[in-house]
Image (cartoon, helix red, strand yellow):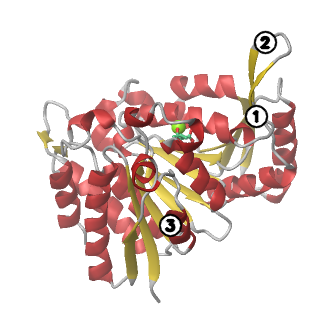
Amino acid sequence: MSRNVLLLPGDGIGPEIIEQAARLLEALNHRRSLGLQLSQARLGGSAYDAEGSPYPDSTAQAARNSDAILLGAVGGPRWADVERQLRPEQGLLNIRADLDLFANLRPALLFPQLANASSLKPELVAGLDILIVRELTGGIYFGEPRGIRTLPNGERQGYNTDVYSESEIRRIARVGFELAQKRGRRLCSVDKANVLDVTLLWREVVTEMAADYPDVELEHLYVDNAAMQLVIKPKQFDVILTGNLFGDILSDEAAMLTGSIGMLPSASMNESRQGLYEPCHGSAPDIAGQGIANPLATILSVAMMLRYSLNEADAADSIERAVSAALDEGLRTPDILTSDTTRVGTAEMADAVIRNLD
Ligand code: IPM
Ligand code: MG
């Protein structure tokens, strides 16, 4: 059975890291006869430049026909003046909505080899392993009405709507509970139920559902407290479940606890487990084209893709072991370099991972 994997290199460092991740994927494909067919399309600023839209029809067609998608990153200062509906980030929001990729998984896992890279004391983060489950196709990101209007007195007013229906809450909460069952069996739902009605409903629905998962310990935190707890005692968390906006913010915070956002993968999936996989970091235009970007977040995104969308858990494990082995060799891209390690570039880091595949 052949399966289609679509590569979307995107902007900035995206093409460089996707090139390396594709080499690794081809190596595994060959070695393990995975039967993956790779193809490529455009998303973001590069798509806007070439086809006039950040999510062109050609890309949408290819995306709908794929089993899994690997994305580099989108955006950059070059497109800062483009109107909002055509900005690179809009391409990302469009593909999420088009494929109904509501479940966003963002692990914040600290590799023991990098314990000194965190801005927190090593003892606070040693062994850190948090999974953020962020709702990705609803909430204030997509709620209507939205816009900027002019009031009768001539003043402009900007507005957005934070809205979640019960079914949207249920389907993401189910993902959170089920993943908690496979991990440390603790789920922390994050809301602002003391102020926002939309998250009061969120809390009620999640609480009701807990009865179906007696083996999972459920806790609720307000988002301000959750943000604080993440830097005071981050290891108290196992799975964090939250909506689109809070998940955006908390996932950046959690990522930084590990010291390098250059190490963190992510998955965005729909009900049929079709998924878009991408590194948590952005397009880093300041270092684009220099061959120094860390490819490991993208390589680890390939592992998530194999595990969640392609049912190839063994291949996924072998990538994660190979990444750890490359770090054990002391190889580091500049973002994770310390005085006792060896500086390498994007391609050399990927070479080391490919060499360590079993
Ligand atoms: C993310 C990013 C996106 C988001 C932007 C680029 C639209 O910050 O994936 O976290 O806000 O969701
Ligand atoms: Mg973000």
Q: Quarter-wise, where is residue 192 in the image?
A: top right
Residue identified by numbered label 1: 146
Whole-percent x, y for residue 43 in the image: 46, 54
> In the displayed image of the protein, which residue is found farthest to the top?
153
Whole-percent x, y for residue 356 in the image: 21, 64
Nearer-N-terminus badge (3/1): 3
Marks 2/3: CA–CA distance = 42 Å
Q: Quarter-wise, where is residue 174 in the image?
A: bottom right
Q: Do the residues under discs 2 and 1 have CB atoms within 8 angstroms?
A: no
Q: Which SS class for mark 3?
A: helix
Which amino acid does the dot numbered 1 rest on?
Answer: Arg
Circle on res. 154: 2
Residue closest to the eye, 146 or 184: 146
In this picture, residue 117 sits left or right of residue 185: left
Residue identified by numbered label 3: 58
- Residue at x 27%, y 45% (from the top left corner): 294
Nearer-N-terminus badge (2/3): 3
Whole-percent x, y for residue 241 in the image: 67, 44
Residue closest to the eye, 76 or 324: 76
Q: Which SS class for mark 1?
A: loop
Whole-percent x, y for residue 353 in the image: 23, 60
- Above or below 176: residue 248: above
Which amino acid does the dot numbered 2 rest on?
Answer: Gly
Q: Quadrant of ligand 1?
A: top right
Can the viewer see residue 180 in this picture? no
